[in-house]
Amino acid sequence: MFNKTKSPAPQPRADTGSAIPPLPDLPSPAGATPAPAAAGRGTPSPVSQRGLSTLSADLQFDGNVSGGGDLQIDGAIKGDVRVGRLIVGETGAVEGNVSADYVEVRGRIVGAVSGKQVKLIATAYVDGDITAEQLSIDIGAYFQGRVLQGRREAPPVNAPKPSAAAASATPPHGDDRPQIIDMKAGA
């Protein structure tokens, strides 16, 4: 009943000097080469390859690592790691506390893990507490420690403060305390 004509896909401009990579969920335009996905790993992680720093498998680092960028650890770090996004590869090991917005663990972490989104892949080994807003644990991953699920809520803007008598008489609408779950998981 209805017919829709397909419009031709936009062609990359030749005057830009470098090709812009397509978004991961959209098909690549004709003539563009897709970014290589991790072989055999299913969906690609949200860490961009452009700003990814890597500690290769044959390197060992003693000391703390911090920064706002993306880091993949395939070697070993003895110290705390605080970055924007972190991937601990299958050969990677961290002995210390880890903090990042996004943490994907395929290797070994001995220490506390903190992040907005934490994923333990089937090959992961984590011995320490995890504090996360979102936590995913694949079957086969080893985890020993406590899980603290914290929700970061924005403070109200210009909200009137209740009087001390009213605050003590009525309980708050929600429980802002983190949930604590003790668990042992492993294969």
Image (cartoon, rainbow, N blue to C red):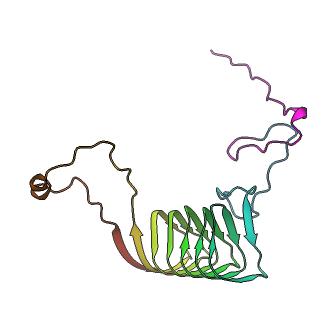
Tally of marks: 0
Q: Where is residue 166 drawn, in percent x and y?
A: 11, 52
Residue 167: quarter of image: bottom left
Magenta segment boundaries in residue numbering: 1-27
Secondary structure mainly formed by the magenta segment: loop
Rendered position, 164 above or below 125? above
The quadrant of the picture occupied by the C terminus is: bottom right
Question: Would you say residue 144 is visible in this rendering?
Answer: yes
Q: Residue at 80% of width from left, 37% of height from top? A: 29
Q: Nearer the viewer, residue 88 or 163?
A: 163
Front residue of 26 and 160: 160
Depth check: give the residue in front, 176 or 90. Answer: 176
| Residue 97 pos. (x, y %) | 54, 78
In-image side of 184 versus 4 (left or right)? left
Location of residue 58 in the rendering, given as x and y in whole percent from the top left corner: 79, 82
Residue 187 in view in this figure: no
Q: Quadrant of residue 84?
A: bottom right
77 is higher (above) or lower (below) than 139: below
Residue, far top: 1
Quadrant in which the N terminus is drawn: top right
Q: Is residue 130 left or right of residue 34?
A: left
Q: Is residue 109 magenta?
A: no
Left of 99 or right of it: where is 173?
Answer: left
Q: Residue at x 22, y 52 (%)?
A: 173
Residue closer to the observer: 150 or 31? 150
Residue 149, image x, y percentages: 40, 66
Q: Residue at x 35, y 50 (%)?
A: 155
